[in-house]
Image: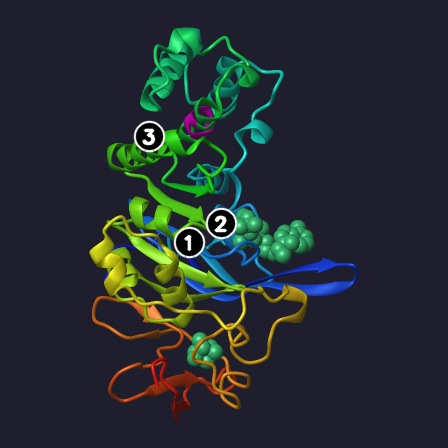
């Protein structure tokens, strides 16, 4: 369990968007704390709300409901210079570096801008030194070969390294890396991930790593935590080895089952879960009760389509899960009703193998 003060804490955060006069409940009540220097992965299928969550963590998007605390205080309470400093300490690196880097600026200009704007350097010599330092930190060496280039003259991997260097210009305490390697060649992904891990240790920065790829999350966040999202909610969260080694929510179990294993022995012993449906429901028409019920192997009519299971702590290690159908022993499932969260319902449940 973490005891330090979180850098950012989402408390019952909701976010809606209006599209074609329809309210889309993209985030429906997320509780999530991000601690100093930790690695936390947010995983889930396309459209489940990962980027929306990441933007709220980075202070780029306001919630429609709930509260976001930074250093223990509601983000809205910070004003003036304190607010500006706070904003700077939360950075985001986007999926597509080509779109986020100005194509008509050289790398030197791209990195100079935030350093000068926030008066983080004094004079040209210090500016040049800092740019050299930043490019070296992200392994773009020798910096002299890079500074005068434009983004289109770099490879996808190099551009993403520049985006990371730009995020580092303002000495952040937290970086949200949103699908930061999904647009670069598989062959160079590992290099960038290793660099991010090294930067986290060297610069004491927390990293929120957003990905739809559980295998990538497992690799990157083995020493951290994983939060699994499904249609605007976190359905399971815990230390990565616990979530991967002992996935409890049926959705996490299906994701883990789908991760390929190099070792045939492990593959043999792996759980095989077939979803009832591959189709992801639309946010404009979220299924009643548990939103996962049209796809869940353990679906039980009358329960799963009427009650929303909420996150519960199920171990001393801090693993939280929104539903735990037991496949051995008791064959029980626990639910918390949303209207009266104190009422604990225990219902008989069909097992996967029975
Ligand atoms: N500004 C917006 N206006 C209307 N709808 C939006 C807006 N931003 C996001 N959405 C909708 O919210 C849902 C979740 O979007 P989000 O980008 O957070 O998902 P995601 O998990 O990051 O998906 P992906 O893996 O494809 O990046 C999507 O259906 C998206 O269309
Ligand atoms: S509540 Fe029902 S449908 Fe939802 S995950 Fe649990 S068993 Fe599956
Ligand atoms: Mg996204």
| Residue drawn where x is 38% and y is 30% of the image | 187
On screen, residue 294 above or below 183? below
Circle 1 is placed at which residue position?
A: 42
- Give x and y (percent) for residue 305: 55, 83
Q: Quadrant of residue 205?
A: top left
| Residue drawn where x is 39% and y is 89% of the image | 349
**Label 2 crowd (10 A; few <14 / some 14-19 / many >=20):** many
Per the rendering, the mark at residue 175 is: none
Is 162 a magenta residue?
A: yes
Q: Quick one: quadrant of the N terminus?
A: bottom left
Q: Earlier in the sequence, mark 2 or mark 3?
A: 2
- Give x and y (percent) for residue 211: 44, 48
Contact, mark 2 vs mark 1 (Cβ under 8 Å)? yes
Q: Secondary structure at mark 3?
A: helix
CA separation in Å, label 2 and label 1: 9 Å
Judge by depth and name the residue closer to the eye, 223 or 215.
Answer: 215
Circle 2 is placed at which residue position?
A: 54
Residue 337 in sight here:
yes
Mark 2 sits near ligand 1, with its Cβ under 8 Å away:
yes
Residue 309 in sight here:
no
Circle 3 is placed at which residue position?
A: 191
On screen, residue 77 above or below 90? below
- Which residue is at the far right? 21
């Amino acid at each position: 369990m973490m005891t330090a003060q979180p850098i950012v804490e989402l408390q019952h955060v909701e976010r809606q968007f209006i599209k074609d006069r329809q309210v889309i409940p993209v985030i429906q009540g997320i509780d999530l704390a991000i601690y100093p220097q930790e690695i936390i992965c947010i995983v889930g299928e396309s459209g489940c709300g990962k980027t929306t969550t990441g933007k709220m963590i980075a202070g780029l998007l306001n919630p429609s409901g709930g509260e976001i605390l930074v250093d223990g205080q509601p983000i809205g309470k910070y004003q003036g210079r304190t607010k500006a400093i706070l904003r700077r300490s939360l950075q985001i690196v986007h999926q597509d570096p080509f779109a986020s880097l100005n194509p008509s600026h050289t790398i030197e200009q791209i990195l100079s801008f935030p350093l000068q704007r926030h008066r983080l350097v004094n004079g040209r010599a210090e500016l040049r030194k800092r740019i050299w330092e930043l490019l070296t930190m992200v392994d773009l060496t020798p910096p002299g070969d890079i500074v005068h280039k434009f983004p289109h003259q770099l490879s996808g991997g190099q551009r993403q390294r520049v985006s990371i260097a730009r995020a580092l210009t303002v000495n952040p305490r937290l970086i949200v890396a949103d699908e930061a390697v999904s647009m670069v060649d598989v062959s160079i992904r590992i290099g960038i991930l290793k660099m991010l891990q090294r930067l986290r240790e060297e610069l004491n920065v927390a990293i929120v790593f957003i990905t739809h790829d559980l295998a990538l999350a497992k690799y990157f966040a083995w020493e951290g935590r994983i939060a699994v999202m499904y249609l605007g909610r976190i359905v399971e969260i815990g230390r990565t080895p616990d979530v991967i080694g002992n996935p409890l929510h049926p959705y996490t179990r299906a994701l883990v089952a789908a991760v390929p294993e190099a070792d045939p022995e492990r593959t043999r012993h792996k759980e095989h879960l077939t979803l009832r449906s591959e189709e992801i429901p639309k946010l404009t028409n979220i299924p009643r009760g548990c939103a996962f019920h049209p796809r869940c192997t353990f679906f039980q009519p009358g329960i799963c389509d009427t009650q929303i299971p909420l996150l519960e702590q199920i171990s001393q290690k801090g693993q939280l899960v929104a539903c735990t159908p037991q496949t051995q022993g008791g064959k029980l499932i626990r639910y918390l009703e949303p209207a009266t969260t104190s009422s604990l319902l225990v219902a008989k449940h069909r097992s996967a193998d029975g």
